[in-house]
């Protein structure tokens, strides 16, 4: 008997190898067990082009309406893709479009399996990275200075009033300057999304910055974050979780020595760098999940990896592939569990948890795709093909 899901889930289909796995996951692992009203949006490259990318905006609006979405990886077109698909134009990244419409923050969380040990021995629980993906050096202005001269920053208030001018440097010779910004609104949304996520996942929040050196810029991040954490203090106490601010270098040192199990909230550049470090520290991109959380509690789940283009071209040539579907399966289970929590339907949550443990037990029994087989201990004698792995999970589940 199928389990009934009370409210809809927004599904966004995608591209290439992940689109192929997506179909198998739905058919073999989800639809046989759940009676769910799926609001389907095809974000495949061709359909985005046909709709002048309106489909992406519609999908984002649907996530706002229903609260929970699950997304397959999609192509972010570059010049080569425009040619390959004969696109009308180089459409924006769907992830960037959805993120900006939801004003959300992306959290990346590794899936832990016993036979794929992390590079850092002490890590036992996931280290979740939340990256503030707005501003700083990613929206900067730079000048290469050719010779002696004076560099200043000037702020001109919109309503008139005195300009503020600060000297950056008196150049005696060639050099370089950079101007960057952030907004209080964006920092506050970031802090709120982190708090939302930490409450749901029941995990402590660590936030690191360099406020001893950058007393105003990093100082504002520290103060806004502390303010939002203060407002949530009672909820934190109830959930038994803590907020910790530390210097970023201290945070890095503590993370390496820790067992994991925290949400590490990062400023934009720190998040860019540290998410790659943590991802490779935990093993494979195929084990990294990702969720976009808006400050008002809307959730969109996906795998952190892309469409695995190289495998797709092998597949098109008729060759067997061994592509890891685990992060895509966990995107589904993440969305289903969240839906169940929001709807107050524990049987739906239990289904998601059971499917997750079936995936983990399959890998721990020694059956896994090539990417994991290369780093597992002990090494399995052979690896599973894309479809074989999903079939094995289905069998483990039943
Ligand atoms: P990718 O799809 O993440 O794959 C890069 C390589 O990582 C693969 O060739 C494969 O290595 C390995 N890999 C990644 N995921 C894997 C999995 N599930 N199982 C096994 N191996 C896996 O990145 P890409 O090839 O650079 O990008 C392809 C397309 O994805 C691009 O058009 C890009 O725009 C898009 N993209 C989308 C998202 C998203 O929608 N969230 C994110 C990133 C990229 P081997 O070839 O060595 O086996
Ligand atoms: Mg990076």
Image (cartoon, rainbow, N blue to C red):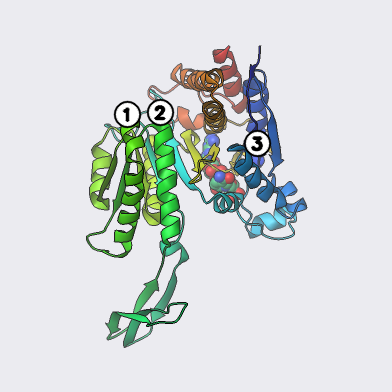
Q: Quarter of the image holding residue 37?
A: top right
State whether residue 94 is above or below residue 167: above
Q: Residue furthest right?
A: 50
Disc nearest the viewer among 2 and 3: 3
Q: CB of mark 2 within 8 Å of CB of mark 1?
A: yes
Label 3: which secondary element: strand
- Going from N to C along the chain, the mark reached first, 1 or 3, is 3
Can you tell which mark lies on residue 335? none
Residue 313 in view in this figure = no
Residue at image position (24%, 42%) is 254
Rate crowding at label 2 as few (under 14), some (14 to 19) or many (20 or more) other CA atoms within 10 Å. Answer: some
Q: Position of residue 24 (x, y in %)?
A: 66, 27
* Depth order, front residue of 13/59: 59
- Going from N to C along the chain, the mark reached first, 2 or 1, is 2
Q: Is residue 209 left or right of residue 343?
A: left
Q: CA distance from mark 2 to mark 3?
A: 25 Å
Residue at image position (38%, 84%) is 146
Q: CA distance from mark 1 to mark 3?
A: 32 Å
Residue with the mark numbered 1: 124
Q: Is residue 114 left or right of residue 243?
A: right
Residue with the mark numbered 2: 112
Residue with the mark numbered 3: 11
């Amino acid at each position: 008997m199928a389990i009934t899901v009370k409210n809809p889930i927004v599904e966004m289909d995608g591209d290439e190898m992940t689109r192929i796995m997506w179909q198998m996951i739905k058919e073999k692992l989800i639809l046989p067990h759940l009676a769910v009203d799926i609001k389907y949006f095809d974000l495949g490259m061709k359909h985005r082009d046909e709709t002048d990318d309106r489909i992406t905006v519609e999908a984002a609006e649907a996530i706002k309406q229903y609260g929970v979405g699950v997304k397959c990886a999609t192509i972010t077109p570059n010049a080569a893709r425009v040619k390959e698909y004969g696109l009308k134009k180089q459409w924006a990244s769907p992830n960037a479009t959805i993120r900006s419409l939801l004003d959300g923050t992306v959290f990346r969380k590794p899936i832990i399996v016993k036979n794929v040990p992390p590079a850092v021995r002490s890590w036992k629980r996931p280290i979740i990275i939340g990256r503030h993906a707005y501003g700083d050096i990613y929206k900067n202005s730079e000048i290469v200075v050719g010779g002696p001269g004076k560099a200043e920053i000037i702020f001109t208030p919109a309503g008139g009033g005195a300009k503020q001018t600060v000297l950056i440097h008196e150049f005696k010779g060639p050099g370089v300057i950079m101007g960057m910004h952030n907004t209080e609104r964006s920092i506050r949304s970031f802090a709120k999304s982190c708090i939302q996520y930490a409450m749901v996942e029941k995990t402590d929040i660590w936030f690191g910055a360099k406020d001893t050196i950058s007393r105003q810029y990093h100082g504002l991040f520290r103060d806004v974050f502390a303010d939002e954490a203060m407002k949530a203090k009672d909820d934190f106490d109830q959930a038994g979780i803590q907020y910790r601010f530390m210097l970023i270098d201290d945070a890095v040192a503590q993370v390496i020595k820790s067992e994991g199990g925290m949400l590490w909230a990062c400023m934009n550049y720190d998040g860019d760098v540290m998410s790659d470090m943590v991802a490779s520290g935990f093993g494979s991109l195929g084990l990294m999940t990702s969720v976009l959380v808006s400050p008002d509690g809307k959730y969109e789940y996906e795998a952190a990896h892309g469409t695995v283009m190289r495998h797709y071209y092998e597949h098109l040539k008729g060759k067997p592939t061994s592509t890891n579907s685990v992060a895509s399966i966990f995107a589904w289970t993440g969305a289903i569990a969240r839906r169940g929590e929001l709807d107050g339907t524990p049987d739906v949550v239990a289904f998601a948890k059971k499917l997750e443990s079936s995936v983990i037990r399959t890998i721990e029994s020694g059956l896994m795709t090539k990417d994991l087989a290369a780093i597992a201990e002990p090494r399995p004698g052979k690896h599973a093909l894309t479809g074989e792995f999903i079939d094995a999970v289905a069998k483990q589940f039943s």
